[in-house]
Image (tube, coloured by chain):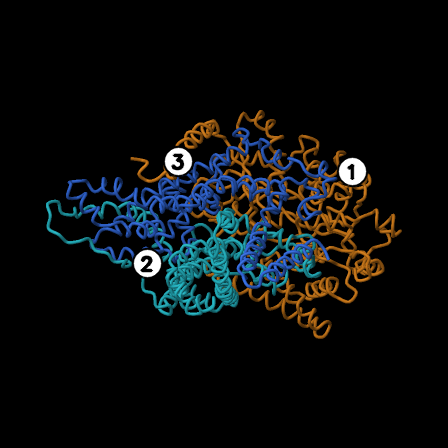
Chain colours: A blue, B cyan, C orange
Amino acid sequence: MNAVHLVLLCAAAVAVLLYAVDRRRPLLAGRYARFVALVLLAAAFLAPFAWITCAAFKDRRALLEYTFLPPPAAWGRMINLGNFRKLFEPRASLQGTIVFWQYLLNSLFLSSAATVIQVFFCSLGGYALAKFRFAGRRDLMLFMAGSLMLPSMLFLAPTYDMMVHIGWIDSYAALLVPGAANAFGIFLFRQAMLGVPNSLIEAARVDGAGEFHIYSRIVMPLVTPMTAAFCLIVFMGQWNTFLGPQIFIQSDYKLTVPVILSQYVSQFQEEYGMFLAGTFISIFPIAVLFLTLQREFISELTISARKR
Amino acid sequence: MTPAEEHPVHRRHRSPTPRWAPYLFVAPYVALTLVFFAYPFAHAIELAFYQTAGPNARVWVGLGNFRYILSDPDFRTAVRNTAVFSVAGTALMLPTSLGLALILNSGRGRAAGLFRLCFFSPSFVGQIFVGILFAVVLAPDYGLLNRFLQALVGRGLETRWLENTATVMPAIILTNLWLYAGFNMVYFLAALQNVNPDLVDAARMDGAGPWRVFRHVTLPAIRPVAIFVLLISTIGSFQLFELPYALMRSTTSPYGPDNSALFIVGYLYDAAFSIGDLGLASAVGWVLALIILTVSLIQLKLTGAAND
Amino acid sequence: MLLNYGKAPFFILLVAVATGIGVLATHRRYEAARPDLVLMTHAKLHADVYLSRLPEFERRYGVKVDVQVVEEVALRTRLLAAFAAGTPVPDLVEIPQDAALFLRGPIRDIGFLDITRWVRAKRLDERMLPARFSMWQRKGVIFALPHDVHPVMLAYRADIVEDELGIDVSKIATWDDFAAMARRIVRYGDDGRPARYALELQDDGGYLLQALLLQRGVGLFDAAGNVTFDSDVAADTVAWAVRQLRGPHRIAYSLGFGPTLWEGMQDGLVLFYFAPDWRTRTIEEYAPSLAGKMKLMALPAWTPGGRRTSTWGATGLAATRGGRNPELAKKLMEFLYVDQTDGGRSSAELRILPAVRAAWSLPVFDTPDPYFRGQPILRLYSRLAGDVPPDYASPFITKAQNKRDSAFAAASAYYSLHGEDGFVDFVRAELRRQADAVRAVIARNQITEQ
């Protein structure tokens, strides 16, 4: 009998109680059961995060001694910002000392730039596929669908080779340009734009509006939820992407957060404390973005689902 | 609303649809694809028929690479592992994410947004992080999961998830489930908005229990999204690499004890960076692409959905 | 017009512009002077030490050297791709042992500089332990300087073994002695008292198995590049290790590496640990509560009078063919690896015995280490250093390691199911099977190696 058993027992007891109290209206018990289920599931999903949070603030020596937190009496000894301090310590490198902020800045830049670029180019492509009929459209879409199935590992070596010839090794262009217009984004925007009434577009054409004007002034404002959702997806993807920066970036000061953090947990370095502290920090920008865009994210998929 | 194909209305009016517009809009995608996809693509095709060693040496082997792959017991292991993961993982993923969506959807209240965040939050963390993190979570004696199991059922503290051939796959599936269930749940949440509440009420008034309501009203309504989730889960499962690789970092073999964590992309990686034969790696990539294509087509045929 | 896309993209655009300016501003600071030499290493510890020593080198030759730390896997991938594509490469690369991958293919194509003549001219192959050069050559061509010797000893919980249990470790000369001693003191945890094991081993074979095998002179490959891990000695060792982990009189436990190791060490779950010189530093850092409680002893021999050490890990320094200034690069190699201009202090700090034999007698290595109860640990290691077994390189080293570990895992599983019944035959057959698989990979190679 321990904490876990106690919690479960209490939850079950309340459920039985609610049911017994008013058997004519099981709704209350049902809703309570649903709530309990949600709480338990949420706890299961959040447990690793709770662990990360606790571990980030725990002294390295106490990392595994206590599952989450040591008893309050030991907090003075074991809870501190040591991991964070070490993380932000200037790293010696003969190009100058680098601080962790630099990597955060790099990651922020790459993620936001990738988002903006991809929103622009993918929406263009999506618009064309959604609202125009042109020769080769079918084949193009087929090709795009097929390309989504190919493993990216396949192209690693040839792509590196190509980047060398262009001279983009160790430059952010290698990370930002190839994915600027990708099949996934184009499909997403196409899906959203199918729902834009053609009458609006035709009316604009009749009024003599230019094509780009129609795209930017009429169509895009109507798909802002999907744009927001796409922003979230791209930002998150780029923020966490590992293989690309690792392969294409050579200079230390240009690296991104995932690459640097993974360096702390390798055969020769076992700085789990710093790794977890860094992970803890790197979750924040995404969490913030998600919280602000949450409504659009869900509602957009809602709208597009209704279209079916 | 009719899916997919929507033609602009053909009407004779003053300003005809400019014919160059769509081509201009897809031009970025086409250009980028030609440069960053077609060239590596062609190179990768060519490479598959060669054997390479070191930076320059190449020897034509025709179908030799393919013959080797098909006769290599390690490849068979990789295919078996990938298939098991794909089937078992998807079989668990779909009901889990659907279940989460159903529970979340069946009530009201602003707590829903909070729970949504909880379930979705694992996506904030990249695959590499999750791998390294879960290697510690799954650790014997001191890891989070084992400690929880010990508290719950009084056993399991010593389970060596990542060191026993029998438990490696469940560990990977579990980690993958944690990572993506919330993400797929969002798709299902959107799809559930599609269920016509009138139909549900009608069915209930006819005396149908919750299961029958689900089977006859809900399920058909979410079918397109379910098929979509099934498809992307399957394609994703065939491309699994970073997660098992990061999980196995703490053990000496990156492919798990006795290759139990070896998947097809891992086999590709091994060919490229362990054997050092880029030709072999390309050949593996093509075999994988073929497998994905075949499986996807079969899936599409079986589920009877021909939408793109 | 920008707001037409919605608030989210607009806000992100602002972030992109702001951070873009930040990136431009901050990166410019680093793009300063073009270094004359770039040294890329996989070990941050080494990098830190080099950085402290470099100013002297830079002063002497009036150059600027840049040290970059790149994680092992990334290093391998980048170098492979760079060699293949002919990109600019770092002038010097410090590589771990399994980077022998780069020795694949025709000799003339190998991306590292052939330093054989230079090594012979400076007699480095005599001044540095010859057994360490074997790792970095191919068909008699030397490509890298060995960094270390890495003799292996056993680190043990002296507070438990000597103080509490009263065991005299100087009486333990062979592994049989060790096993006999261990059987008396192990506890399996089923009588209420906490479990206690004598030796750490790995469930999947791994480095510890390799250390045991090398101690008996069995590596993955021999000097000619033939696969050798399926010999009778190897089978015997594998069987022994499996019995210690799984047998009815088992004495070993698998703690793994990572946080669980340090917890177990501090809890006294395992008493004896394999400790090459570099691991003493790790132990001191991650198990600080054991200060003054640990000691070192030589490995028990397999046969009376046999070798009492092994080796674990190897790092080498290679110059690349694509480097800009090979002469300067060689000077740096000499400075970092051969010259002990700081009296061996940086080696002592890293706890890594250099490969240069003359350096072993440096007085700095006599410093007593309070963590290990005042033992002069590097002096102890230096006494064993000459005995370290040679290991040989092959481009297929990672494949062979995987295969051997697979055999170990299979043997372990077999033993759990069948015990001693047919066990030894199974181990032999399994090792042969896996070794043949590696031979098949080698055999399919059609590219002439010269």
Asked whether, in this view, residue B41 is left or right of residue C41, the answer is left
Q: CA distance from mark 1 to mark 2?
A: 73 Å
Q: Residue at x 75, y 34 (%)?
A: C364
Q: Is residue A140 left or right of residue C432?
A: left
Are labels 3 and 2 assigned to the same chain?
no
Q: Residue furthest right?
A: C166
Give the camera-side residue of C38 and A223: A223
Q: Quadrant of the N terminus of chain C?
A: top left
One can see residue C102 in this view = no
Report whether residue A142 is seen.
Answer: yes
- Residue at mark 2: A308
When asked about the image quadrant of residue C343, the answer is top right
Does residue B78 sit above or below C300 in this rendering? below
Q: Residue at x 59, y 48 (%)?
A: C136
Identify the residue under disc 1. Answer: C369
Subunit bearing disc 1: C
What residue is disc 3 on? C11
Q: Residues within 10 Å of mark 2 (few under 14, many from 20)?
A: some
| Element under disc 1 | loop
